[in-house]
Image (tube, rainbow, N blue to C red):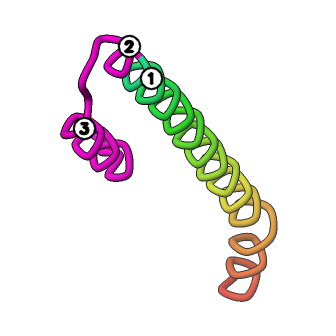
Amino acid sequence: MVVTCTNCSNMVTQMLEHITGIEQLSALQNRVSEAMTQTAQQIRMVQQNIERYENMFHVACNYYIIPKYLHKII
């Protein structure tokens, strides 16, 4: 899966247009690195939430929904 951080891309593009020295370039690198780290953490949190909901759904289907439905059929 490829994820593009639009805010990060826009920020980098805008800042690159105004950089006039090595210090500013270094500061940009630090900001982008931090933004990428935060984005990766947020993606992991979303992935964990999806997995949690998938597990809840499977438990509900296996123990509550499917047995009751099968009982009505039989």
For the point 69% across and 71% down, the residue is: 66
Assess whether residue 16 is covered by the magenta stretch. Answer: yes
Q: Which residue is drawn at 19% across and 40% down?
A: 17
Predominant SS along the magenta part: helix
Q: Is residue 63 left or right of 66 when viewed as pictured?
A: right
Magenta segment boundaries in residue numbering = 1-26
**Which residue is most to the front?**
20
Looking at the image, which is closer to me, 48 or 12? 12
The residue pinned by badge 3 equals 18
The answer for how far apart the CA atoms under marks 2 and 1 are is: 15 Å
Q: Which amino acid does label 1 sit on?
A: Ser
Q: How far apart are marks 3 and 1 (CA)?
A: 19 Å
Q: State the SS at label 1.
A: helix
Instruction: Pinpoint residue 55: horizontal percent, then vertical percent.
Output: 68, 50
Q: Is residue 70 visible?
A: yes
Q: Residue 60 versus residue 2: which sits nearer the camera?
A: 2
Q: As rendered, which of 26 and 32 lies closer to the eye?
A: 26
Dots 2 and 1: beta carbons under 8 Å?
no
User: What mark, if any, has residue 33 been given in the picture?
Assistant: 1
Along the polypeptide, which appears first: circle 2 or circle 3?
A: 3
Res. 1 visible in picture = no
Residue highlighted by disc 2: 23
Image: 4 above or below 24 = below
Question: Is 5 above or below relative to 20?
Answer: below
